[in-house]
Image: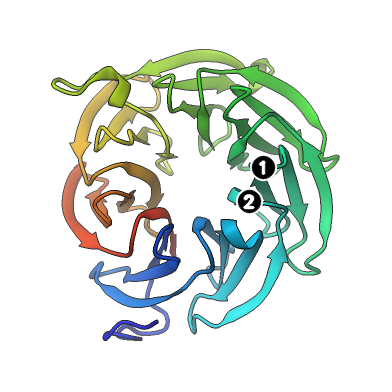
Amino acid sequence: MASAALFATPADASKIFVSNEKGNTITVLDGTSFEVIHTFNGGQRPRGITASPDGKTLYICASDDNLVRVFDTETYEELPSLPSGPDPELFVLHPSGNPLFIANEDDNIVTVVDVHTRQVLAEIPVGVEPEGMGVSPDGKVVVNTSETTNMAHMIDTETFEIFANTLVDSRPRFAQFSPEGGKLFVTSEIGGTVSVLDPADNYEIAHKIEFAVPGVLPEALQPVGLRVTADGKKAYVALGPANRVAVVDAETYAVKDYLLVGQRVWQLAFSADGKHLFTTNGNSNDVSVIEVATDKVLKSVQVGEQPWGVVAVP
């Protein structure tokens, strides 16, 4: 399925890819104008989405296909898929570009796949309903969050063994390291908090960030996606049905602002140059574009049905 503006931008222009969970499509936005330039089939129930470090290859968790679908980011041609285990939801790519660590919600495992040979390297037992995935900047640690066990599991990327477990608040959804690797942020959707774990202290909780928005019920403040700026100074937290993105000082942990975006904001991604932040808003079927320097919401862009994940490529 292609939009009327197919290939409207030069091949070397930056792009933003959005997975539409109910529409089974991937929407492509131009990285400068933020307009829709293409739409293609992403498999059954596409959710997690990421790209290779060089920006040339797109990986998509096609949850109901039990596969990771792979595409060329320039031509949108589908490449050979990767095995994933059942119901892949989120994954993280090693900073080197290989391997891929995939959360399999139904099987309570993290599947490790070599993206070149398309072979499963390991299946790592974790807690119940694994979802969130994160990787340290040096590539030595992968983190899985298990929604029902309410834990973050730290995995050695060489041995594929868990070396630490941390109990966090209810229904942890996402894990993100700070750029220098000195902090690990874990969102808890039902607990309503973000736990800050200290890698130097065996990943013990050093701080918890809480949220409060006037006129919004506390139970609607559900942290899901989280991203930290490249300078490590700000963290942005998607607050789900609160329709807000919290702006957090990543050094003092003070909440500086709440930005009104679309309905049921879910995942976040920075542009390739770090100047903009994109949010997927599942119930309003749009993406909000935030200017990082000013924390202003610049515009919303209609995409497919129930946008879930987002990634930008240079």
Badge 1 crowding class, 10 Å Cα cut-off, few under 14, some 14 to 19, many 20 or more, is: some
Q: Amino acid at mark 2?
A: Asp
Name above or below for residue 154 compared with residue 48.
above
**Is 181 situated left or right of 212 in this image?**
right
- The C terminus: image quadrant: bottom left
Residue 266 found in image quarter: top left
278 versus 241 height, above or below: below
Measured Cα–Cα span from mark 1 to mark 2: 6 Å
Q: Which residue in the structure is indicated by mark 2?
A: 87
Query: Mark 1 or 2 closer to N-term?
Result: 2
Q: Are marks 1 and 2 in contact (CB under 8 Å)?
A: yes
The percent coordinates of residue 253 (x first, y second) are 37, 20
**The disc labelled 1 sits on which kind of residue?**
Asp
Identify the residue under disc 1. 106
Q: Residues within 10 Å of mark 2 (few under 14, many from 20)?
A: many
**Marker disc for residue 4:** none
Residue at 74% over, 40% down: 109
Residue 19 point in image, percent of width and height: 43, 61
Asked whether 56 or 193 is in front, the reply is 193
At a point 39% along the width and 21% down the height, the residue shown is 192
Q: Let me know if residue 203 appears in the view.
A: no
Q: Position of residue 102 (x, y in %)?
A: 67, 49
- The x and y percentages for residue 84 are 70, 56
The answer to whether 234 is drawn above or below residue 255 in the figure is below
